[in-house]
Image (tube, rainbow, N blue to C red):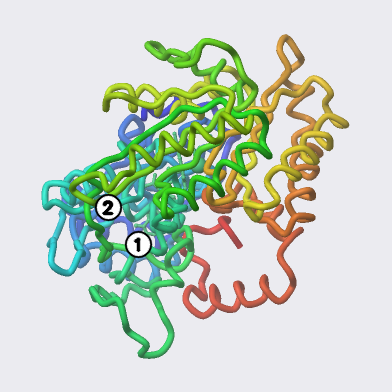
Amino acid sequence: MAAPALKPLPETSYQPTPAQADALARIKVVVGARGWTTNTEEMRPHLIEWRGHYQGRAQMVVRPANTAEVADVVRICAEALLPIVPQGGNTSMCGGSVPLEAGEEIVLSLARMNQVRAIDPANHTMIVEAGCVLQTIQGVASEADRYFPLSLAAEGSCMIGGNLSTNAGGTNVLRYGNARELVLGLEVVLPDGRVWDGLLGLRKDNTGYDLKQLFLGAEGTLGIITAAVLKLFPKPRAIHAAFCAVRDVPAAMELLGRARGQSGDRVETFELISRLVIDLILKHIPATHDPLAARHDHYVLLELATAAEDDDGLRDSFEAILATAMEDGLVLDAALAQSEQQRQAFWALRENGSESQKLEGASIKHDISVPVSAIPDFYEDAWNAVLEIEPKARLVAFGHAGDGNLHYNIAEPVGGDRAAFLEKWGAISAAVHDTVHAYHGSISAEHGIGQLKREEMTRYKSEVELDVMKTIKAALDPMGLMNPGKVI
Ligand code: FAD
Ligand code: 2HG
Ligand code: ZN
């Protein structure tokens, strides 16, 4: 994922303290010549996020090669009160992975820590370093005839340390859970530089608090994940995919319930896609095609999978599910993939949602979840609330409806005034988020809080929740040096 060009930032008066200047010199010695840079061009991809919304400055980008180096760097930073932004693939959707504008922090990139330390097929586990790219991990698991199910459109760039630190979701959560549920153990460098080695491959361990849960989803605010024990699964032998036009959103959700029940709960993926998403992808992404003859308002990309060698009747079951759903008017048309190539063509109409939206212009993103049963009502209510604020807004809704998560994004009106649209950001987001809250949902289902939703979160979390979060932060990172300005 190419980093956008840097924009000019307001002047900063930040000067390193003498202790920080000394720390920077010591860090250079610890990590060696390959492990640091202050070169503007080399630092650029680390300072700006992929949409260009958040950009900061840093005193240095540090790239340690192993856990001992990370620990030394963090210890030096703790002594000199030098704040740290941990960074993986820098694909964050909420400004969590880039430094602030002031320029006081160092960026600590895990990219050089990219070794698969071990794989244990019999235990269905592998031990990976934080800088392993997600797609590489999937590939290594597959070579060992195992399956690592975490999957998302950024998988060619995002790194497992970032995935675990954001508790990433993606397209297989319905069946396998979030990133959090795919971890058995962690190795973490704490804010004072101590190393917690919790790399256990156990499915049962009730010896006190489950410490790994603190760091999963903490967005780098409590420590630096350097390695993890991941859970593996039997490899699916057959994956059947259908691209279905559905009557409406309630019909889509009715299809989900039926597909789960009638397939023996073998739904691997259930992604809802609104027509505007397809239009934007066909417009902006080369070599994409609409698999269905007519236009429809909503689609579902549905996949059923089995690890059984003989398909176990799954294809027949899938055809029967679709036939009944068509008879009952839930599904208006459907294409069942006849080859892996066709399946990938369906996925191109889903995974390019973010990219095509970026190319189309401004959009106000809402990564929300509600109970699966509330999706149809939420979908309609939130849209009515948005239209009251911007009658010409365009709804670019897509996402992992099977687990209750939608990317309920609002694109700028065609030919409208972009600045005027963006001025309504706060009002539009409040309208969507208030509707989410009314349905007992979450304003960040999978992307995290970062900088984007730090203030917004305080509107919806209770005082008790915020207080407990602050207490944990203060206990582990009393000087506030880990990813300051993010989350809390
Ligand atoms: P970064 O962006 O580098 O960092 C993310 C956060 O984790 C930051 O707060 C950072 O400080 C912290 N961090 C990174 N590494 C460490 C570490 N080793 N220790 C401690 N803290 C660390 N997300 C989903 O959940 N589901 C999706 O379907 C999805 N699709 C996406 C599609 C596209 C096209 C893009 C661009 C992004 C998508 N995302 C999605 C968001 C993003 O890919 C995920 O949040 C991903 O998990 C981030 O990984 P990363 O390595 O890029 O982390
Ligand atoms: C996805 O599911 C990502 O493709 C990105 O989470 C969502 O761009 C978005 O809003
Ligand atoms: Zn998503």
Relative horizontal placement of residue 187, taking residue 264 as reference (left or right): left
Is the C-beta of the residue carrying label 2 under 8 Å from the nearest atom of ligand 1? no
N-terminal-most mark, 2 or 1: 2
- Residue 393 visible: yes
Q: Which residue is mark 1?
A: 182
Residue extending furthest right?
388
* Above or below: residue 190 compared with residue 316: below
Where is residue 477 shown, x and y percent of the image? Answer: 48, 73
Crowd tier of the residue under label 2, counting other residues whose Cα lies within 10 Å: few below 14, some 14–19, many 20 or above: many
Kindly identify the amino acid type of the residue bearing the numbered disc 2. Phe
Q: Is residue 94 visible?
A: no
What residue sits 66% from the left and 51% below the top? Answer: 443
- The answer to which quarter of the image holds residue 69 is bottom left
Query: Does the CB distance between marks 2 and 1 fall below 8 Å?
Result: yes
Give the x, y percent position of residue 211.
40, 78
Q: Which residue is mark 2?
A: 148
Residue type indicated by callout 1: Leu
5 to the left or right of 24: right
Provide residue 192's location: percent of width, then percent of height.
38, 75
Q: CA distance from mark 2 to mark 1?
A: 8 Å
Foreground pick, 102 / 417: 417
**Percent x, y of residue 306:** 29, 48
> In this image, 264 relative to 387: left or right?
left
Counting other residues with Cα less than 10 Å from the Cα at mark 1, is it few (<14), some (14-19), or many (20 or more)?
many
Position of 284 relative to 113 (above/below) = above
Tag 2, which secondary structure?
loop
Disc assigned to residue 267 = none
State the residue lying farthest toward the bottom.
207
In front of the other: 157 or 319 = 319
**Rendering quarter of residue 129:** bottom left
